[in-house]
């Protein structure tokens, strides 16, 4: 496809990798293309990273028509740069688009865009341990009118940010509070879609949890407030006795690509992994009788993140003595090993740039 390129007058200085947090700095360029119902996708361009003009009546500003993705490009030990399962992000974005009545992007077109953009910005992929280039594709409805209806104009963009770890704890265990008041999503709603509104709705509980010293909240289902769903920016997994349990995808949970990858790794290695309903009562019982051996979260930004403390209705439980567990460490090592090109990718998940 034809992507117009507008060269920046001056390129930015690359940051010191030891100072990278999450999503605070951006690369030199951004990708943009527009869509209209009549013409489809058009005007694909890579331009210097900058503010974008937006009409004050734009759909996204009033009715929240926005979806996004998150994936990373990694600097391998041999110096080359690769993405991790980009096709999964492309497919998930199309599912999100379908739910939000935004336009879909053909898979081969999206992959070409991701590849060309990362190739241009690959020098921004840091090489220090645990760092990567976080890619944030996003799309929003951009009609310049206040009527509420499926959008007729949309914009798709990609921005990129060199990142370190998402949590200030790094790979150290995080403290998570089980939220029993607010809910994030309900079946039939937008929980499975990666849309901005889900995150806006979760901020109040997240803020309350942070004030109490927790990193994020663990959501319960929106109908009975009984079943474990996921954490603010990651899916969750538990080792209870010999079983590894992760909440099944009922429609209100984001189908995480890291979750899928963890399940595939564990199943290949012969572990018992069950995607099923897990009630908070069952989890509480497992915490009380000591059968909850490990708990961890998994997501692109969070990677594999041990959960060292869980709090439910002001009752605090320490998981695995507050230390990273064996399976959590193993998953972290395996996934990051594949992502940074240190472990052979027997799954065919990595996608080399250039
Ligand atoms: N759940 C939520 C709410 C998320 O924001 C994320 C992050 O993208 C995940 C789960 C994990 O998904 P993935 O592994 O695809 O990054
Ligand atoms: C990601 O892991 O890519 C996410 O999108 C999480 C994010 C909300 C920070």
Image: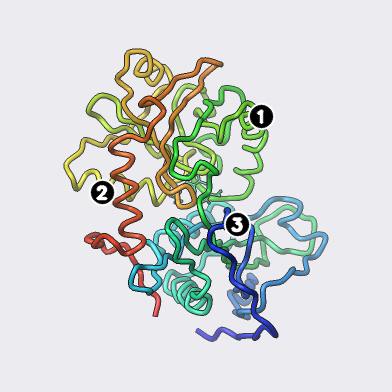
Q: Upstream in the sequence, badge 1 or badge 2?
A: 1
Residue designated by label 2: 265
Q: Residue at x 26, y 37 (%)?
A: 273
Task: Give the spatial CA distance, label 3 vs label 1.
Answer: 22 Å
| Element marked by disc 2 | helix
Residue 298 x/y as whole percent: 41, 44
Q: Upstream in the sequence, badge 3 or badge 2?
A: 3
Q: Residue at x 25, y 48 (%)?
A: 265
Residue 66 x/y as whole percent: 63, 55
| Element marked by disc 3 | loop
Task: Give the spatial CA distance, label 3 vs label 2.
Answer: 28 Å
Q: Residue at x 47, y 75 (%)?
A: 109
Front label number (3 vs 2)? 3
Residue 135 x/y as whole percent: 52, 63
Q: Is residue 17 above or below residue 311?
A: below
Graded by Cα atoms within 10 Å as few (under 14), some (14 to 19) or many (20 or more), the crowding at tag 2 reads: some
Q: Residue at x 64, y 73 (%)?
A: 34
| Element marked by disc 1 | helix
Ligand 1 within 8 Å of the CB at mark 2: no
Residue 222 x/y as whole percent: 54, 29
Residue designated by label 1: 211
Residue designated by label 3: 23
């Amino acid at each position: 496809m034809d992507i117009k390129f507008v060269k920046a007058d001056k390129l930015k200085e690359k940051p010191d990798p030891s100072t990278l947090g999450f999503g605070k700095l951006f690369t030199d360029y951004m990708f943009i293309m527009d869509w209209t119902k009549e013409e489809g996708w058009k005007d694909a361009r890579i331009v210097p990273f900058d503010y974008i003009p937006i009409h004050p009546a734009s759909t996204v500003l009033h009715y929240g028509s926005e979806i996004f993705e998150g994936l990373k490009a990694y600097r391998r030990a041999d110096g080359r740069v690769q993405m991790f399962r980009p096709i999964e992000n492309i497919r998930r974005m199309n599912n999100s688009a379908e739910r939000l009545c935004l336009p879909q992007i053909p898979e081969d077109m999206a992959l070409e865009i991701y590849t060309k953009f990362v190739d241009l910005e690959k020098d921004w992929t840091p090489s220090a341990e645990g760092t990567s280039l976080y890619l944030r594709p996003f799309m929003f409805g951009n009609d310049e009118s206040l009527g509420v209806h499926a959008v007729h104009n949309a914009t798709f963009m990609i921005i990129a940010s060199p990142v370190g770890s998402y949590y200030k704890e790094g790979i150290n265990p995080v403290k998570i509070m089980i939220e029993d008041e607010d809910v994030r999503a309900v079946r039939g709603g937008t929980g499975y879609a990666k849309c901005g509104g889900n995150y806006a709705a979760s901020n109040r509980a997240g803020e309350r949890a942070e004030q109490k010293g927790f990193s994020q909240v663990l959501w319960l289902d929106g109908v009975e407030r009984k079943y474990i769903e996921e954490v603010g920016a990651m899916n969750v997994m538990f080792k209870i006795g010999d079983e590894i349990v992760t909440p099944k995808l009922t429609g209100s949970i984001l189908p995480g690509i890291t979750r899928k990858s963890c399940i595939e790794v564990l199943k290949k290695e012969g572990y018992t992994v069950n995607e099923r309903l897990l009630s908070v009562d069952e989890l509480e019982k497992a915490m009380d009788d000591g059968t909850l051996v490990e708990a961890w979260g998994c997501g692109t930004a969070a990677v594999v993140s041990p959960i060292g403390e869980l709090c439910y209705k002001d009752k605090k439980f320490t998981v695995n003595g507050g230390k990273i567990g064996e399976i959590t460490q193993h998953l972290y090592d395996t996934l990051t090993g594949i992502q940074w090109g240190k472990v052979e990718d027997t799954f065919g998940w990595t996608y080399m740039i250039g």
